[in-house]
Image (cartoon, grey):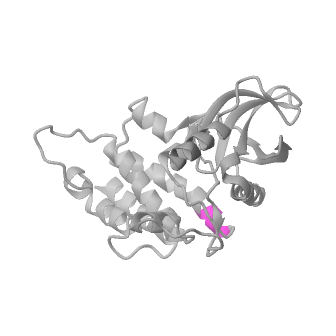
Amino acid sequence: MLQYFRNVYTSWIDYPLREGRLLGGRYMVERFLGMGSYGLTYLCRDSREAGADVVVKMAKPSKKELGRRLLQREHEILQVLRHPCIPEARQLFEESGRLCLVTEYIAGETVEDLIFREERRFTQEVSLRFVRELLEIVAFVHRQGYVHLDVRIPNVMVRGGEIHLIDFGLARRIGDTEGLEPFENDEMRRRRTPVVQSDLYAAGHFLLFLLYSTYRADENSPEAGWEEELTVSDGTRTLLRRLLQEEPPYADTVSCMAGLDRVLETLHGS
């Protein structure tokens, strides 16, 4: 019963703000975008910048100091990662004792929306080229000394044909394990350990989502693994096995992109 009341209390204090709420004296809440592990995100209109849309992420009250600390870290990281395909950090401010981060709004569609809402189909070659472009952004993040640690289809957007990587709430410096909680399982260890292979592992799952967009299951066939269900080239199969750490993983993003380029050359020449 005590846990029940704790859950009710947490849901209450973390309840999203209503539309029309003014934050920081200038940001009008237009709609709630979503809730993550440590923050609530809103699309807001900036009254001081000709009504431009921005994203405001507010630390969850239930996470207390941890939520504030992670939002502060995200702000610091985004200030370093100046890249046209990464949202720009605009401002950090307090609202009713809650820390808020303002970032550029990327007006586009997530890959999650493209696959599941629009039912977009990605062929093998298109999937590989998409991931190749995404890895250029990831490689930039790594060169600055950071890992994203949350490369997933909801966090990759397409705007005007250009790929953008968003939500750096879990990003860390490479090798920074300070305050890192014990991993629940091996899957989380592979995704959240602050090393470049974690982002590559996530890129492998990202590639699987793209490839599965063209897969049509036979209702009479038993469920199998991706190697049995997907029809891909030998090069793509090896690439995936290395990304997913089923074979020795790539040492870094550059070697991974080189391997991906070789697969594309083979496909193009076949």
Q: Residue furthest left?
A: 220
The residue range painted magenta reads 139-143
Q: Is residue 138 magenta?
A: no
Res 142 quadrant in image: bottom right
Q: Does residue 46 appear left or right of residue 165 in this picture? A: right
Residue located 68% across and 35% down the image: 42
**In this view of the protein, which residue sits in the foreground, 66 or 265?**
66
Residue located 23% across and 56% down the image: 225
Would you say the magenta stretch is mainly helix, strand or loop?
helix
User: Relative to residue 227, is residue 101 depicted above or below?
Assistant: above
User: Relative to residue 206, is residue 22 depicted above or below?
Assistant: above
Residue located 20% across and 40% down the image: 217
* Residue 230 coordinates in the image, percent (x, y): 24, 51
Q: Residue furthest front?
A: 1
* Residue 164 coordinates in the image, percent (x, y): 60, 46
Q: Residue furthest top?
A: 20
**In this view of the protein, which residue sits in the foreground, 116 or 85?**
116
Q: Does residue 260 appear left or right of residue 55 in this picture? A: left
Can residue 48 be seen here? The reply is: yes
Number of numbered discs on residues: 0
Can residue 257 be seen here? The reply is: no
* Residue 56 coordinates in the image, percent (x, y): 73, 39
* Residue 106 coordinates in the image, percent (x, y): 66, 38
User: Relative to residue 261, is residue 10 depicted above or below?
Assistant: above
Residue located 48% across and 68% down the image: 183
**In this view of the protein, which residue sits in the foreground, 60 or 206?**
60
Res 41 quadrant in image: top right
Q: Quadrant of the C terminus?
A: bottom left
